[in-house]
Amino acid sequence: MSCRTTTFALLAALALSAATPATSVAAKQKRCPASGAGCSLKQVAAETGIFAGTALSNEMTAAEKADVIANFNAVTSENAFKWSEMSKTAETTDFATTDRLVAWARWKKLRLRAHTLLWHRIQNAPWLKAELAAAPDPAARLRELIAERVTKVVGRYRGKIEVWDVINEPLAIFGAGYDTEDTAVTPKNIFYTTLGEGYIADAFRLARKADPKAKLFLNELLWDSRIGDPKSDALLALVARLKKARVPIDGVGIQAHAMLGTSSPWFPSTTASLKSYIDALGKLGVKVEITELDVRLPLLADQPNPLAAQAAVYRRVASACAQARACTGLTVWGVRDSDSWLDSYSLTSATAPNKPLLLDASGKRKLAYQAVAAGLLGRRR
Ligand code: 9MR
């Protein structure tokens, strides 16, 4: 065959393949079935437009990296960005781990949620209390430290991090207020007790200035909380106050650890109750993401099939997210069951292994995995 004939044949073949409906049929066939069977959550994310995420540990193993790439299209730093991890002293900020994590997420095209700038409860800067106690004007010193941290950290990654958890867990664990005393369960909210609620608005404004395009979230612990309890109402009221004051808040994270089993039935009571709560937040003008979902298996030990019961809880949450227009993502708090924080946490280590995640200890997809896929597929682009 002459060179010209070959070229012609090639062009003809190309034109044919572009015109033939075979490609679109193939693409159609590849769509996930409504049951989610055989589909990865990252495929589901592509079809629904809902981010499917997982938490990333500071030191990722090769297996963890492979699991993340095969299954998810979004990641949250589980610990790396916390103040205690980045600043061992008031004068220093160590970016080694966060730089590595940001570079990896960008390389793999995973949306990154950086967690978190200010959290009073655990992993706050270990030196902060003494620093404020020694300051002639503790409020002024705290304002200065917050401005320094937010500006420096957000600014360093300007244009490279899509989402920030600017404020984590500002409200008390239960009830409608803030932690104002040190107790055995939680320290006082040192930001609130020193500066009042204004620390939240200040941090959001500083973050917006440092990276105008990043999405800024307030992330709150609503574990086993029934919608309509004082805490969920307090969160709505707080977001309404922030919006009214034109604070640049783009979203609210609902952590959703189903952990304590203090309420029954399990969080969320129903798909409808969680959906209506997300809708209520959405009406205030914010997006919503489920940010730290895990479901402890021992809580379901009395069920005939605990793994199926666990999958049902996951499905309720995923369906609510799919049905509520404001919901833009669902993230589980860890990759494999064996990575979960619950097995080393004091309140839950006695029941280890808690097996709360979507992949088992060997990386195999559990029933809950497909349940999340099916739930999210309730929304299609
Ligand atoms: O998973 C995190 C674990 O590795 C840490 O030791 C723990 C203590 O700070 O924090 C865990 O993550 C928390 C998250 O940052 C905020 N919401 C509650 C999570 C579970 O405590």
Image (cartoon, grey):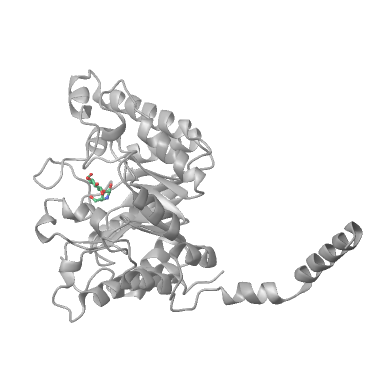
Does residue 23 sit above or below 122 in this rendering? below
Q: Quadrant of residue 301?
A: bottom left
Residue 21 visible somewhere in the drawing: yes
**Foreground pick, 100 / 291:** 100
Q: Position of residue 178 (x, y in %)?
A: 22, 46
Q: Which residue is drawn at 75% across and 75% down?
A: 20
Which quarter of the figure is the N terminus placed in?
A: bottom right
The answer to whether 227 appears left or right of 374 in the picture is: left
**Foreground pick, 156 / 353:** 353
Residue farthest along the front direction in this orientation: 1
Which quarter of the figure is the C terminus placed in?
A: bottom right
Does residue 352 sit above or below 181 in this rendering? below
The answer to whether 270 appears left or right of 304 in the picture is: right
Residue 275 visible somewhere in the drawing: no
Total marks in image: 0
**Foreground pick, 95 / 290:** 95
Residue farthest along the bottom direction in this orientation: 304
Q: Which residue is drawn at 22% across and 25% down?
A: 132
Q: Residue at x 41, y 32 (%)?
A: 153
Q: Where is residue 142 in the image (x, y as percent from the top left)?
A: 29, 27
Q: Position of residue 63 (x, y in %)?
A: 35, 52
Residue farthest along the top direction in this orientation: 136
The answer to whether 7 appears left or right of 159 in the picture is: right
Q: Position of residue 268 (x, y in %)?
A: 29, 69
The answer to whether 272 appears left or right of 155 in the picture is: left
Q: Quadrant of residue 128?
A: top left
